[in-house]
Amino acid sequence: MWGLARQERVGYNPFCMRFIEPHAHMVSRTTDDYADMATAGCVALCEPAFWAGFDRGSADGFRDYFRQLTEVEPRRAANYGIKHYTWLCINPKESEDMSLAADVLSVIPEFLDCPNVLGIGEIGLNKNSRNEIKVLQQHVDLAAANDQLILVHTPHLEDKYKGTRLILDVLKHDSRIDPERVMIDHVEEHTIGMVLDAGHWGGMTLYPESKCSPARAIDMVERFGSDRLWWDAACDWGPSVPLAVPRTACEMRRRGHEEKLIEKVIFENPKQFLSQCERFQMDCA
Ligand SMILES: [Zn+2]
C-alpha cells in the first residue's frame, strides 16, 4: 500500500492520528512514556486497578493505590495534555486472599465519586480458582448496585478459554448487568466470538510476547468486523509497548485499510464504550 501516492489514500493525513489508550498501567511507567504517547496522538487513557508488581499486605495499601489512581496519575497525564481515567477493584491475582478482598471491597465505595473513575475493573480471573470466582461475583454485585461500567481481565494462555467461559457465566447470571456495559479484555482468536455473541465488548491487548500481536489484532478486525472492539497496550510492569496502538494503526494503513476504519478502532470505539459513563468527556469532536 505504501506504493500508492499518499494523497490517493482515502482520508490519509500523516500529521493527524488521535487515539485513546483504554488500558494502561501508568503507575509502572515513566514520564517519557507519557510524552511519547502524547506525541503519537494519545488524547485520553484509562488505567484499571491491577497488580502493582508486588502483593500488598493490607487494604490500606490499596487505599493509597486508589489515591495514586485518582489524584496523582491524572496530574501526571495532564502535564502532557492527556486525560486520565481509572477503574477500581482488587485484581484477581491478589483476590485469592478472601479476607483482604473483603477489606478492599469495603474501601472502593470511598472512591466511586472521584471525577476520573469510570467503573469497576479490571476484575476477572487469574487461575480460575473458587476464591477468585467468589470475589468476581462480589465485584459484579458492587458494580450492579452502583450502576457502574465493568472492565474484565481474562486469564493468560492455557487458562483463557475456560476462564472466559466462567466469567461470561457469572455475568449472565446477574440479571442487572447490561452486556453492552461490560468490556472483556485480552480476547484472542478462540475467545473473541463467545464474548461478542454474549453482547459484550472485546479488547485486544497488543503485547510483544504473549496475548496478541499487531498482525493478529488486525486479522481479528478483518474477520469479526470492527464493532464493539478496541485495542490496548497494557503499558504494565512486564515487557509491553506504550505505542503499540498507534504502531498497529500504521500496520493497518500498510495493509490498505481506510482511515475511517482505523479511527473507528483506535478512537471512536473506545470513546463509544467509555462514554456510557457520563464522566468520560472528550473535548474533540
Ligand atoms: Zn491490565
Image (cartoon, rainbow, N blue to C red):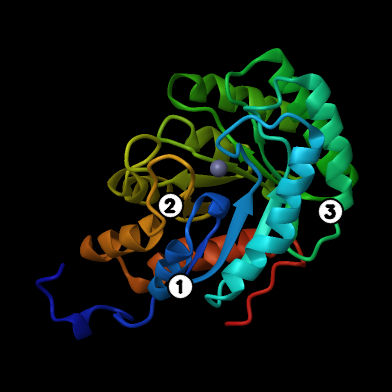
Is residue 83 positioned above or below 245 on the image?
below
- The amino acid pointed to by label 1 is Ala
- The amino acid pointed to by label 3 is Leu
Is residue 225 positioned above or below 95 on the image?
below
The residue at 54%/55% (across/down) is: 26
Relative placement, left or right, of 230 versus 215 is right
Q: Position of residue 144 (x, y in %)?
A: 85, 42
Q: Which residue is mark 3?
A: 112
> What kind of element bears circle 3?
loop
Which quadrant contains ligand 1?
Answer: top right
What is the CA distance from the residue labelled 2 to the residue labelled 1?
28 Å
The crowding category of the residue bearing disc 2, from other C-alpha atoms within 10 Å (few below 14, some 14 to 19, many at least 20), is few
Can residue 219 be seen here? The reply is yes
The residue at 27%/66% (across/down) is: 253
Q: Position of residue 6 (x, y in %)?
A: 19, 81
- The amino acid pointed to by label 2 is Gly
Q: Which mark is residue 38?
A: 1
Q: Earlier in the sequence, mark 2 or mark 1?
A: 1
Q: Which mark is residue 113?
A: none
Q: Which residue is mark 2?
A: 225
Question: Do callouts 2 and 1 mark residues in contact (Cβ within 8 Å)?
Answer: no
- Mark whose residue sits in front, 2 or 3: 3
Relative placement, left or right, of 163 versus 263 is right
The crowding category of the residue bearing disc 1, from other C-alpha atoms within 10 Å (few below 14, some 14 to 19, many at least 20), is many
